[in-house]
Image (spheres, grey):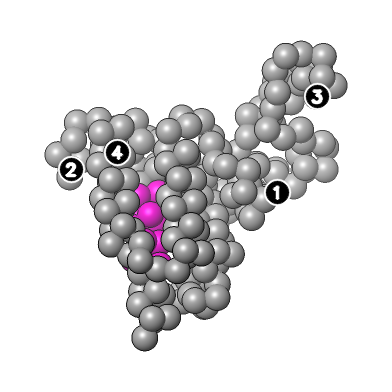
């Protein structure tokens, strides 16, 4: 009985977070609120939605301390992303769980558009630090990733948008994070 309740609670919180992250492209990276909500700006909307999700989670905080810590960590990680105003803007743990999130890092653009500056930063000859330092192999993998995404969207009849591709990867990462953290009680229900 307790395991079933925990599984249900994890599923509810997952669905709430998924619903919020699923609005990334629609809200232009949370810079505006969805048309159907009362808030006039994206920040007010995101704050309200996260407060609602925290309240939902708080109703379940009588779980085991391990599950409580995991839910709180995930909520804090999502808040970090929502407040980072950068892409990918996720915590290191999410990029470790879903390395494809790194393909959205500004390091690739810097490497392409300003290779001399990128090399200085990479070599530690600048005060700037990047969250990753791609090499040519990584550049090729990234190129193949975006070509596959472009083809997938074309096959689905959707216009290509890097924001849409990032949103898809962000949702995939959320699923993977929940699988890593709650695979013991959630099992295969996440993938479906």
Q: Is residue 101 above or below residue 118?
A: below
> Which badge, 4 or 1, is on the more N-terminal residue?
4
Q: Which residues are magenta?
A: 10-22
Q: Is residue 31 left or right of residue 100?
A: left
Q: Which residue is mark 1?
A: 144
Of tags 1 and 2, the one toward the viewer is 2
The residue carrying pointer 4 sits among few (fewer than 14), some (14 to 19) or many (20 or more) residues within 10 Å by Cα, namely some
The residue carrying pointer 2 sits among few (fewer than 14), some (14 to 19) or many (20 or more) residues within 10 Å by Cα, namely few
Magenta stretch holds residue 12 = yes
Q: Label 3's element?
A: helix
The residue at 52%/68% (across/down) is: 182
> Residue 47 got which mark?
4
In the rendered view of the protein, which quadrant contains the N terminus? bottom left
**Circle 1/circle 2 CB separation < 8 Å:** no
Q: Is residue 69 left or right of residue 110?
A: left
Image coordinates for residue 111, horizontal then vertical, percent: 74, 25
Q: Which residue is mark 2?
A: 37
The residue at 48%/75% (across/down) is: 186
The residue at 62%/48% (across/down) is: 93
Magenta stretch holds residue 90 = no
Is residue 160 among what the camera can see? no
> Which badge, 4 or 2, is on the more N-terminal residue?
2
Of tags 4 and 1, the one toward the viewer is 4
> Which badge, 1 or 3, is on the more N-terminal residue?
3
The residue at 68%/33% (across/down) is: 131
Of tags 4 and 2, the one toward the viewer is 4
Q: Which residue is mark 3?
A: 122
**Circle 4/circle 2 CB separation < 8 Å:** no
> Which badge, 3 or 2, is on the more N-terminal residue?
2
Q: CA distance from mark 3 to mark 2?
A: 44 Å
């Amino acid at each position: 009985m307790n395991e079933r309740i925990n599984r249900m609670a994890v599923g509810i919180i997952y669905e709430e977070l998924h619903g919020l992250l699923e609005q990334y492209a629609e809200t232009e990276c949370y810079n505006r609120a969805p048309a159907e909500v009362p808030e006039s700006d994206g920040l007010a909307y995101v704050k309200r939605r996260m407060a609602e999700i925290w309240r939902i989670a708080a109703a379940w905080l009588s779980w085991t301390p391990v599950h409580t810590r995991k839910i709180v960590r995930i909520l804090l990680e999502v808040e970090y992303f929502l407040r980072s105003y950068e892409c990918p803007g996720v915590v290191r743990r999410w990029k470790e769980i879903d390395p494809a999130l790194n393909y959205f890092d500004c390091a690739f653009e810097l490497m392409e558009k300003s290779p001399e500056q990128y090399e200085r930063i990479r070599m530690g000859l600048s005060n700037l630090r990047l969250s990753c330092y791609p090499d040519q192999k990584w550049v090729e993998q990234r190129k193949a990733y975006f070509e596959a995404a472009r083809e997938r969207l074309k096959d689905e009849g959707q216009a290509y948008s890097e924001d849409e591709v990032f949103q898809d990867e962000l949702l995939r990462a959320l699923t993977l994070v929940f699988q890593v953290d709650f695979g013991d009680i959630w099992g295969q229900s996440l993938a479906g």
